Amino acid sequence: MAKPKRKLTPAEKAAKKRRREETMVVSTLQGRRAAVEPEEVPMSNGKIYLVGLGPGDTAEMTGRARVAIAASDVVVGYRTYVRLIADLVKDKQVIAREMAEELDRCGEAVALAQAGQTVALVSSGDVGVFGMAGPLFELLFEQGWTPDNGIAVEVVPGVTAASSCASLVGAPLTHDFCAISLSDMLTPWPVIARRLEAAARADFVTALYNPKSSRRPDQLREARDLFLRHRDPQTPVAVVRAAYRQRQDVRLTTLAEIADGEVGMLTNLIIGNSSTFVRAGLMVTPRGYGLKYRLADGAARPGETARVSLSSGLEGWRRALVETALNEGVEAAARALDANSSQVLDALSEAQIAPWRVVRDPAPHALLEEALGWTDARLRMSSPGGGLVDLRLADARLQADGDSIVIDGSGWRVALTRAALALAYRVGLPSGEGVWFQDARGETLCRVGSG
């Protein structure tokens, strides 16, 4: 007679369950993907919570983050992040991994969820800002997952580093701002540099993430030098290390001195814009109320109206474009009002103020061929050295040469790429008719005029 099978104790059941899960999760070093044996892992009602933990102190976590962790069977995360929530995961299975193992973490979370587990995949700050939400979705989509066919995924946002650091120094993010990571571990430096240049030139308040590490000592100095091309060296900068954690350190400095002092991976920096100021130890970026109202009594300034766009707002800017173009020309209006020539021509087209007659033409290639046939037509364009080229188009020929449109004249040749020739405007003036040809950025490639 068969001996009755002994029932497993709760501890033995839990150990068996862990062993079964561990055999299902296989991390590969080459692809850094987690594979699961298909016959053992049916698509089930497992779930992944993507949880933003906030800056570090559990008091700064959202209620939803706490609920998601409490509802999870397993917590997966970078070892430092898991330590931050040690009191909340005492009764959980915890998978703690090292830095640069993000895809391993994602693969393990997916495998566990496919096995029917509820998993909290955690990140500090906001899970969707330089966090685990992006790679997790990338991995799922690569595996053919859709929200309606597969494990459930829920994003639980948290307080990102830019917000938590800003709260410790005043109100530096009150106006337009952007966030840029200086880590070139996954992003080529030329891409980062272009973004820094654009943010600096556009006068964005800029939050810098991942500014410096032992392996990347020079990126912060490069970022400083890029910003100094467009910002005053005395521009205020907040340097916040370990916000809302035990080793928190907060200091205010200037753009010129941004790379001085202790800066590491637990540090975030906020670079002010041209209007940011420091007063009484607080860093503040004005929203613009002082442009429109007298701050002392709230009354609208002369020329301004409450609940109406600024006189220098979009409509005021368009009027200024038209007035300057009529008096000084299109290029002068573009330079004076930080516009491109297409924006000026669009404003003239909408205004339809004599003597200008401006019409946007949807077929620039055909219009170029037509314009070359005008009597006494001339081609005007800027030379590489910045001078003005003025060419007579009598007997000039137009021909297609691969991706280029080539104009052959008497002793000269001009080549324009098809892709660059994006827009055209017919412009009528008492002095004659002309066509402005523009590139995709709205800058003038060349003009063809008669008379």
Image: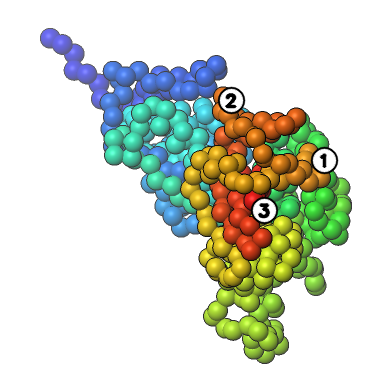
Residue 440 in the image: state x and y as whole percent: 59, 44
Helix, strand or loop at label 2? It is strand
Residue 224 in the image: state x and y as whole percent: 81, 47
Residue 426 in the image: state x and y as whole percent: 56, 54
Q: Amino acid at mark 1?
A: Gly
Tell me how far mark 1 sits from mark 2, CA to CA: 25 Å
Q: Which residue sits at x=72%, y=69%?
A: 327
Q: Give whichever of 222, 435 is nearer the camera.
A: 435
Q: Earlier in the sequence, mark 1 or mark 2?
A: 1
Disc 2 designates what residue?
401
Left/right of residue 33 with respect to residue 124 in the rendered view: left
Helix, strand or loop at label 3? It is loop
Q: Note whether 334 is above or below 72 in the view shown.
A: below
Q: Note whether 320 is above or below 268 in the view shown.
A: below
Q: Which residue sits at x=69%, y=48%?
A: 198
The answer to which image quadrant residue 112 occupies is top left
Q: Amino acid at mark 3?
A: Gly
Left/right of residue 440 with respect to residue 256 in the rendered view: left
Disc 1 designates what residue?
385
Residue 159 in the image: state x and y as whole percent: 56, 55
Q: Earlier in the sequence, mark 3 or mark 2?
A: 2
Q: Are marks 3 and 1 in contact (CB under 8 Å)?
A: no
Q: Give whichever of 45, 229 is nearer the camera.
A: 229
Which numbered marker is on residue 451? 3
Q: Give whichever of 394, 49 is nearer the camera.
A: 394
Q: Give whichever of 357, 89 is nearer the camera.
A: 357
The answer to which image quadrant residue 74 occupies is top left
